Image (spheres, rainbow, N blue to C red):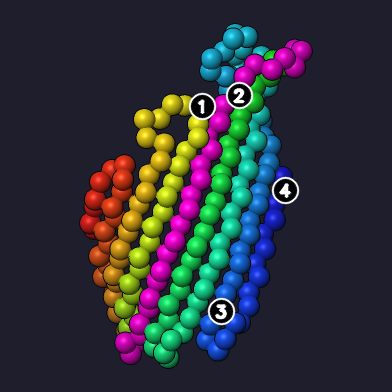
Amino acid sequence: TTSMNAKLTAQVATNHRVALGLLQSQTTYMFDGTPSPNALGLNKGTSDAQAKPRLDAANLTWAAQWLPEWTSTVLLGVSQDQSISEYYRIVDGAFAGSSKFNTTRNQLTWQNDVKLGQDVASVILDTRKESVDSSTAYTVSERTIDSAMVSYALNRTDWNGLAVLRNDQNSQFGSYTN
């Protein structure tokens, strides 16, 4: 397993900060499995199944404090998750097949928080585009999710409360409010 995680932050102006985050991770591990289709007729006892996942992610964040009680954050992120499985015959190492389940996500989020005494009101707008590239044939391989959320956090000495209203417009599953 190898991985790398890095974050670079710069104070670009009074109360304005920009940060770049990077993440990369990859590994190889064995599991019990057989390919599909299975041209060599392997079973769990004759198959050497290897998973080779890899994750690459990057994000850019801008955080601003416009007033003592108002902060705003914009996040732009992208990730690619590759999940590759390869199958070999144990006795002679013959290649028996492979499968993949690779996903990509692009995201843009804008969050505003306003302090009202001890309480905090928040508004968040978010858009994500997700796609899959797989050896399984999916009827939908891409979707877009546009979300809006408002919340109010009550912060008291002995108790806290949170009220949240959220709407998601999902191109695959429709619109939901909760």
Residue matched to label 3: 17
Of discs 4 and 1, which sits in the foreground?
A: 1
Within the magenta stretch, is there residue 96? yes
Residue 92, image x and y in percent? 76, 13
User: Does label 4 or label 1 sit earlier along the sequence?
Assistant: 4
> Which residue is rendered at x = 43% and y = 81% of the image?
71
Label 1 packing within 10 angstroms: few (<14), some (14-19), many (20+): few
Residue 26, image x and y in percent? 67, 44
Q: Secondary structure at mark 1?
A: loop
Residue matched to label 1: 135
Distance CA(mark 4)–CA(mark 1): 26 Å
Instruction: Name the amino acid type tagged 3.
Output: Arg
User: Does label 1 or label 3 sit earlier along the sequence?
Assistant: 3
- Residue 154 versus residue 120: which sits nearer the camera? 120
Instruction: Name the amino acid type tagged 1.
Output: Ser
- Residue 136 versus residue 144: which sits nearer the camera? 144
Residue 159 visible in the shown view:
no
Residue matched to label 2: 98
Q: Is residue 114 above or below residue 176?
A: below
